[in-house]
Amino acid sequence: MTKQFLVDQIKSKHSFLCVGLDTDIEKLPSHLPKNKEGVIEFNKAIIDATAPYCVSYKINTAFYESQGIAGWEAMEATLAHIPSTHFTIADAKRGDIGNTSAQYAKTFFEILPFDAITVAPYMGKDSIDPFLAYSNKFTIVLGLTSNTGSANFEQQKLSNGQFLYESVLEQVASWSSPEQLMFVVGATKAEDLEGIRKIIPNHFLLVPGVGAQGGSLEDVTKYGKNNDIGLLVNASRAIIFASNGKDFAEKAHLQAEQYATEMKSLMS
């Protein structure tokens, strides 16, 4: 998927919602079996219920990998059910030496044909280059995350006065264009988005932390949007686990609709 196609989808739907399929098998509604079939049935129902209101789906691979072969089969079936109009993200947070990263890129861009993958930049440019070798695919680099541990490294001051995360954003942005690179910036760090936009004005930002984690959609939009909107705001638990009953898909539909309605007002 190209950046322009994604921008067009956002503008036509008046939504920049990404639904996170962090499907914890232990949290499936009680009427569904806690196995591969239950996960697939749950995910398909969530996708069908929310597709009109979102432009993207993010599959957190940890929830599938932890289930072994059955989990990988559930992830494959889930990905296949997502409409081609929706941007698909493998939230895998990979990052390793070049030949290993090349295998990760093959896994999530070829074997499982996602549009994007999240990666950790700690090992530097040669660990990310294999992902950037794919055209019409996106590498989403961790920038400023919303967890408390981000203070340990990301928010440390360097000798030049920059925060480490600012140096990461600046350097990584020079490795490719906004046609291939995006960055993760947590919604609970919304006050920092204004400064981040000065470093990377044209890149898309994947923004987790709205919803269950308490981030403000209004603040994220105010400080983070650019001329293309340039945001994919992810909500996971707040949507997919809005109900643990047989009405889970209906409740997910309503939650996604609510996000999309707010996004439309913030885009105008």
Image: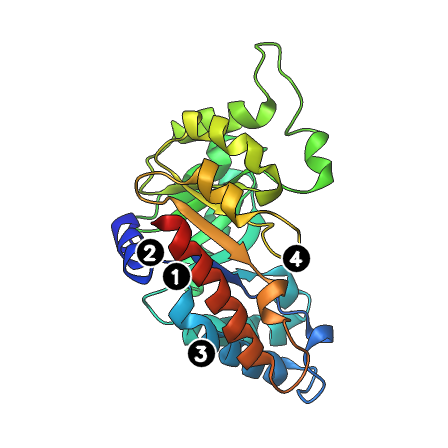
Which numbered marker is on residue 48? 3
Residue 165: image location, x then y, percent: 57, 28
Residue 34: image location, x then y, percent: 70, 82
* CA separation in Å, label 3 and label 4: 22 Å
How many C-alpha atoms fall within 10 Å of the one at disc 1: few (<14), some, or many (≥20)? many
User: Is 149 drawn above or below residue 75 in the view shown?
Assistant: above
Which numbered marker is on residue 55? 1
On the image, numbered disc 4 is attached to which residue? Answer: 212
On the image, numbered disc 2 is attached to which residue? Answer: 10
The answer to whether residue 103 shows anywhere in this view is no
Q: Quadrant of residue 27?
A: bottom right
Label 4, secondary structure: give it.
loop
* Residue occupying image coordinates x 40% and y 40%: 225
The answer to whether residue 21 shows anywhere in this view is yes
User: Is 44 drawn above or below residue 178 in the view shown?
Assistant: below
Marked residue nearer the N-terminal end (2 or 3): 2
For the residue marked with disc 2, what is the amino acid?
Ile
* CA separation in Å, label 4 and label 1: 20 Å
Marked residue nearer the N-terminal end (2 or 1): 2
Label 2, secondary structure: give it.
helix
